[in-house]
Image (cartoon, rainbow, N blue to C red):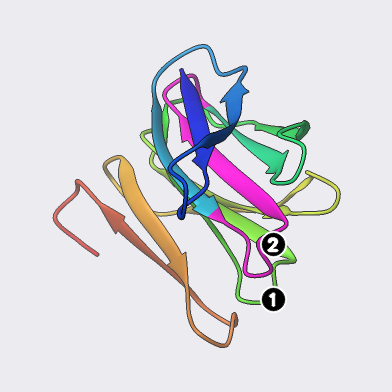
Amino acid sequence: KSARLWDRASGECLHTLEGHRDDIFCAAFSPDGQQVVTASGDGSARLWDAASGECLHTLEGHQGGVTCAAFSPDGQQVVTASYDKTARLWGAASGECLHTLEGHQGGVTCAAFSPDGQQVVTASCDETA
């Protein structure tokens, strides 16, 4: 239900990110290192300020646990994957849902942007990728 930001050199815990109501399955930094996104079984993802540990946005709308979250290469968007059989694209600055990606017959376990940010790949439990 929490994530921690650590200093690599000293091993010191810099921040504990708390607020999710269920296990956190995934965490990732934005490309510029300014933000962190966490994905939780509570059906939400959260965007955090990496310097302060403050929650900036709660990304809500999935109807199942969020299994994965990742930033676009330019840091402007976040993709989330969920057991609700969808992936969603969010504005990183606004926290607003931009698109819901539907079509899988099983839970979506992972999602990622292409290196140029123009495409998203999703993986699912429905025996497709």
Q: Is residue 81 visible?
A: no
For the residue pair 105 and 37, the one nearer the viewer reads as: 37
Q: How many marks?
A: 2
Q: What separation in Å lies between label 2 and label 1 (alpha carbons)?
A: 8 Å
Location of the C terminus by quadrant is bottom left
Tell me: 94 left or right of 91.
Answer: right
User: Which residue of the protein is positioned furthest toward the top in this rendering?
Assistant: 21
Q: Secondary structure at mark 1?
A: loop
Q: Residue 117 sits in which quadrant? A: bottom right
Q: Position of residue 8 (x, y in %)?
A: 45, 53
- 40 up-or-down from 74: above or below: above
What residue does disc 1 label? 74
User: Which residue of the protein is positioned furthest toward the front in this rendering?
Assistant: 10
Residue 79 inside the magenta-drawn segment? no
Q: Is residue 27 visible?
A: yes
Tell me: 98 left or right of 68.
Answer: right
Q: Please report contact status of discs 2 and 1: CB closer than 8 Å, yes or no.
A: yes
What residue does disc 2 label? 77
Bounds of the magenta segment = 29-43
Label 2 sits on what residue type? Answer: Gln
